[in-house]
Image (cartoon, rainbow, N blue to C red):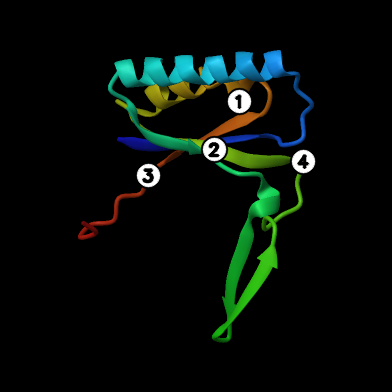
Amino acid sequence: MQYVALIYDVEDRPQSPSEFEEMMGGYFAFNETARGQGALLGGEALEPSSTATTVRVRDGEVLLTDGPFAETREALGGFYLLECRDLDHAIELAAKIPGASTGCVEVRPVLHIPGDG
């Protein structure tokens, strides 16, 4: 089964260069662990939510809003696409993502739609 691990955290958390380096080392280690288990299908970090554009269509009109859909303290900062045996395996991996220790990681199964390539 495929799962998406959505990583949420406070965007403007102050970090020293050494703290940032340590955090990135944790992500590189997670990548190697997940890759070693054959679970890592992909993933990316995202630019800050201030760079987002929210798109809505209402009555045929395209409406754009700068920034994220909701004002919250924690924002989506990145994601992983994982191939896991089951939900327990996905949770086990998600707990190893460094963002889980400072923010949260939402684990969600990928919905496969029949007939969709």
Sequence-first tag of 4 and 3: 4
**Other residues around mark 1 within 10 Å, as few (<14) / some (14–19) / many (≥20):** many
Sequence-first tag of 3 and 2: 2
Residue 22 location, quadrant: top right
Q: Are marks 3 and 2 in contact (CB under 8 Å)?
A: no
What's the CA distance linking mark 4 and mark 2? 15 Å
What's the CA distance linking mark 3 and mark 1? 21 Å
Residue 75 location, quadrant: top right
Which type of secondary structure does the marked residue at label 4 adopt? loop
Q: Quadrant of the N terminus?
A: top left
Identify which residue is drawn at 75% across, 18% down. Answer: 16
Vertical placement of residue 14 versus 2, above or below? above
Mark 2 lies on residue: 78
Residue 15 location, quadrant: top right
Sequence-first tag of 3 and 1: 1
Mark 4 lies on residue: 73
Mark 3 lies on residue: 110
Which type of secondary structure does the marked residue at label 2 adopt? strand
Amino acid type, callout 3: Val
Residue 24, image x and y in percent?
Answer: 57, 20
What's the CA distance linking mark 3 and mark 2? 16 Å
Q: Nearer the viewer, mark 3 or mark 1?
A: 1
Q: Are marks 2 and 1 in contact (CB under 8 Å)?
A: yes
Mark 1 lies on residue: 99
Identify which residue is drawn at 54% across, 38% down. Answer: 78
Which type of secondary structure does the marked residue at label 1 adopt? helix
**Other residues around mark 4 within 10 Å, as few (<14) / some (14–19) / many (≥20):** few
Residue 95, image x and y in percent?
Answer: 52, 19
